[in-house]
Amino acid sequence: MDNFTEADPGPRLPDGAPYRSGVYRFLLTPRWWGINVFVLLAIPFCLYLGFWQLGRFEARVQEERGAGAQAVSAERAPARPFAELLPVDKATSGKQVTASGRYGEQLLVPDRELDGRQGYYVLTLLRTDGGRALPVVRGWLPGDASRAEPPAAPAGQVTVAGALQAPEVPGDNGVSARGGLPAGQTAAISSASLVNLVPYAIYDAWVTLGTADSGMTAVPAAAPNDTGLTLKAFQNLGYTGEWFVFAAFVLFMWFRLVRREVESVRDAELGLVPDERPVPAPSGV
């Protein structure tokens, strides 16, 4: 008769009882119900925000491509009267426009960089037939605006042509936000910045000439605010990675907590955890 060897029944508890396999019953306790619900809500939430931030970055990439195509088409498109394109938005910024009137007050815009050199804009207000003034950047000159003697504006009735631009915001896109400038200077080109410097109404837009006056360098048209691959776009990309990392971290911590709990349950069933219950005092003490 062949020898029969009984299969190994596996680990047993100290009293000889077989080891129970239901170590995951703790997942159904109220405490773990709360943990599980939190994980089930947190992971989709993090993934949703991650994909949302990724979508924002991709939208800005598309805006950058569209802005480049718009700039090329705007340069080739025929110029239109500037009043037809007001108010300035992302679609009209950079469009070629014309304006007629007489030049009035002239201001300098310091701390402007062009081709890696510091200088200033020569800003002259064009008094239109309607009485309001349109800020016109006639060009850029190197040097310190406080010591500058820019060329005078042409006299008489003039018609200018250039790129329409949105009003500037101090502290944004390289626009200086410092105050206390000398008389005859302004930090930003906008009606809000110029309203106290001239005695008449100003259009909330400006034009940079395609061909600068009097030997100055023409100022290229700037992209509309909040478009293209700016710092905000790369912040969206960074936030995308952060949300995905958060989702992975939540899942990792859940598995780690489950593993530790399973190990604790198994140790308790195998008697490997010391009994920490208080020992009753002897009778009569």
Image (cartoon, grey):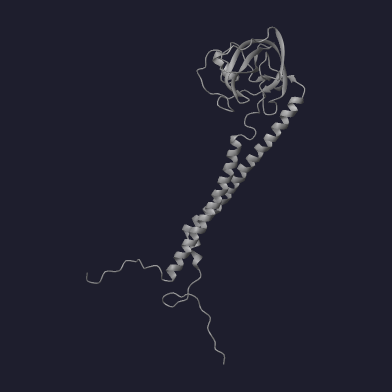
Residue 104 percent location from the top left of the image? 64, 10
Task: Say which residue appears at 59% left-offset and 36% top-offset.
Answer: 232
Placement of 183 over or under 219, stated as above or below: above
Direction bottom: furthest residue: 1
| Most foreground residue, 263 or 137 | 137
Q: In screen coordinates, is 188 left or right of 213?
A: left
Residue 211 is drawn in which quadrant? top right
- In this picture, residue 159 sits left or right of residue 106: right
Quadrant in the picture for the C terminus: bottom left
Closer to the camera in the image, 131 or 100: 100
For the point 59% across and 40% down, which residue is it? Answer: 236
Judge whether 102 appears above or below 27 on screen. above
User: What residue is at 57 percent from the left and 42 percent from the top?
Assistant: 239
Q: Residue 34: image x %, image y %?
A: 49, 55
Percent across and percent down for residue 125 are 64, 13
Give the percent coordinates (x, y) of residue 55: 64, 42
225 in relation to 281, above or below: above
Q: Quadrant of the N terminus?
A: bottom right
Query: Which residue is at the front of the view, 136 or 198?
Result: 136
**Where is residue 201, by image quadrant?**
top right
Image-based side of 250 in relation to 229, left or right: left
Q: Name the residue furthest left.
A: 284
Q: Quadrant of residue 116?
A: top right
- Res 86 seen here: no
Q: Nearer the viewer, residue 8 or 213?
A: 213
